[in-house]
């Protein structure tokens, strides 16, 4: 009788977290990256200048407008967007390389970026939308960011309402009542999605060897 | 500004665990039921007689052949099967009632029962197939059950090989290397599936109220 031991390879997945600002997405992302050694952050390119506190290659890869347009022409970006006068994009090569090595890649992008990713790589995509527990809490978090005028906060709230209208485009929805519970929820989604039959590429071989061994 | 608090109702889901005997399914099921207050076991009806150690209404509902055939005629069973001279089936009413109250229902059924459930209630179904880590371990577990002859064990192994050929019909695959890890894997699948957008029925209302409040 053959001894067959499970060594099932898995292709990585692309985990998208989207939310209106103020819903807690950034805090959740940081906690996930700290706790999950197999998860890596996708680093976007941008043509805007580096801000105080940012580090090149970690927060963004800062590139020239020329380089950005060359990447677009060569189809080297999985998704890209213009925000005011600046361009942003997700380089394709490092993501595909990580997925091929079985690493999972975390994306902090909005619904427009998620739609582009879905067009380019639907089978690898797992999308999670994070909602605030209440309008009151959302406003509290948006105000806590600084001494902004009521008009600025109202503008952010209106933008949040617009972003929230896209919740139906996501696979999973988490209402972020409490950060620790929400982090655990995303961890459960990651753990479950890794167990989906169609992500475990070596299974057919493994089961064949098991059945022959029997 | 309206204060909107998340009270999102959820329809229960049907969690099917299938595996060849000896892969650890029963141990995993018991652990799940102990740890998850929202999970209830589906109790099958059967026409066979009660065995020592079984209790009526817990392991099975023991019914007459007449009653069984009446249930089939009235379409009161979600799935049913004949095994040798005995009949087995899953009553529809208690399952639908539990799902409606937001409880999740656990099914310990084989691939044939799973196929019938999928025909009757695909949207509510989450199916998990449990594989043994190796043929050697599978044989060890099948032998550990008693002092059976090699021929009896060989028969069970052949049946296991046949059952394993249906792994492709399941949503999730768990290779049961270690019970505790496998229980945690099923718990993650449950937690994640509960967060799927299409299972959270009250979300549309909740998001609408959030956006109006903003």
Image: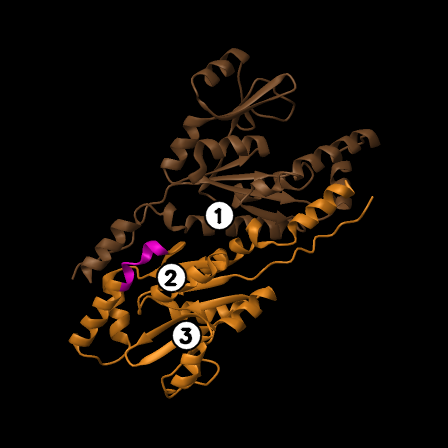
Chain colours: A brown, B orange
At 37% from the left and 64% from the top, the residue drawn is B18
Q: Which label number is shown at residue A33?
A: none
Residue pointed to by mark 2: B115
Residues indicated by labels 1 and 3 sit on the same polypeptide chain = no
Chain of the residue that carries numbered disc 2 in the rendered image: B
Magenta segment, which residues? B163-169
Q: Which label number is shown at residue B89?
A: 3
Chain of the residue that carries numbered disc 1 in the rendered image: A
At 56% from the left and 28% from the top, the residue drawn is A59
- Regarding residue A149, the answer to whether it shows in the image is no
Residue pointed to by mark 1: A190
Q: CA distance from mark 1 to mark 3?
A: 35 Å
Question: Could you tell whether B188 is left or right of A18 in the image?
Answer: left
* Image coordinates for residue B119, horizontal then vertical, percent: 42, 60
- Judge by depth and name the residue closer to the eye, A117 or B175: A117
Q: Nearer the viewer, mark 1 or mark 3?
A: 3
Q: Is residue B168 above or below residue A117?
A: below
Q: Secondary structure at mark 3?
A: strand
Question: Could you tell whether B77 is left or right of B36 in the image?
Answer: left
Number of labels in the image equals 3
Residues at circles 2 and 3 in contact by the CB criterion of under 8 Å: no
Residues indicated by labels 1 and 2 sit on the same polypeptide chain = no
Q: CA distance from mark 1 to mark 2?
A: 27 Å
* Image coordinates for residue A39, horizontal then vertical, percent: 47, 41
- Regarding residue B13, the answer to whether it shows in the image is yes
Q: Residues within 10 Å of mark 1 (few under 14, many from 20)?
A: many
- Judge by depth and name the residue closer to the eye, B43 or A58: B43
At 73% from the left and 41% from the top, the residue drawn is B211
Q: Quadrant of the N terminus of chain B?
A: top right
Question: Could you tell whether A76 is left or right of B95 in the image?
Answer: left
Q: Is residue A92 magenta?
A: no
* Image coordinates for residue A97, horizontal then vertical, percent: 38, 31
């Amino acid at each position: 009788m053959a001894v067959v031991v499970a060594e099932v390879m898995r292709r990585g997945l692309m985990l998208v977290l989207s939310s209106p600002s103020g819903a807690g997405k950034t805090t959740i992302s940081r906690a996930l990256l700290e706790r999950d050694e197999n998860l890596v952050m996708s680093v976007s390119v941008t043509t805007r200048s580096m801000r105080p506190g940012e580090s090149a290659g970690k927060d963004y890869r800062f590139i020239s407008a020329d380089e950005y347009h060359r990447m677009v022409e060569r189809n080297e970006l999985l998704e890209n967007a213009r925000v005011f006068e600046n361009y942003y994009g997700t380089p394709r090569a490092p993501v595909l390389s990580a997925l091929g090595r079985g690493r999972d890649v975390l994306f902090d992008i909005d619904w427009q970026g998620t739609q582009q990713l879905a067009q380019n790589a639907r089978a690898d995509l797992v999308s999670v939308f994070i909602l605030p527990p209440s309008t009151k809490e959302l406003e509290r978090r948006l105000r806590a960011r600084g001494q902004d005028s009521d008009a600025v906060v109202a503008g952010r709230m209106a933008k949040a309402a617009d972003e929230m209208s896209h919740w139906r485009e996501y696979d999973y929805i988490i209402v972020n009542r409490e950060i620790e519970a929400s982090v655990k929820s995303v961890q459960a989604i990651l753990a479950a999605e890794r167990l989906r039959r169609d992500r475990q590429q070596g299974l057919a071989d493994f089961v064949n060897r098991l059945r022959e061994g029997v």
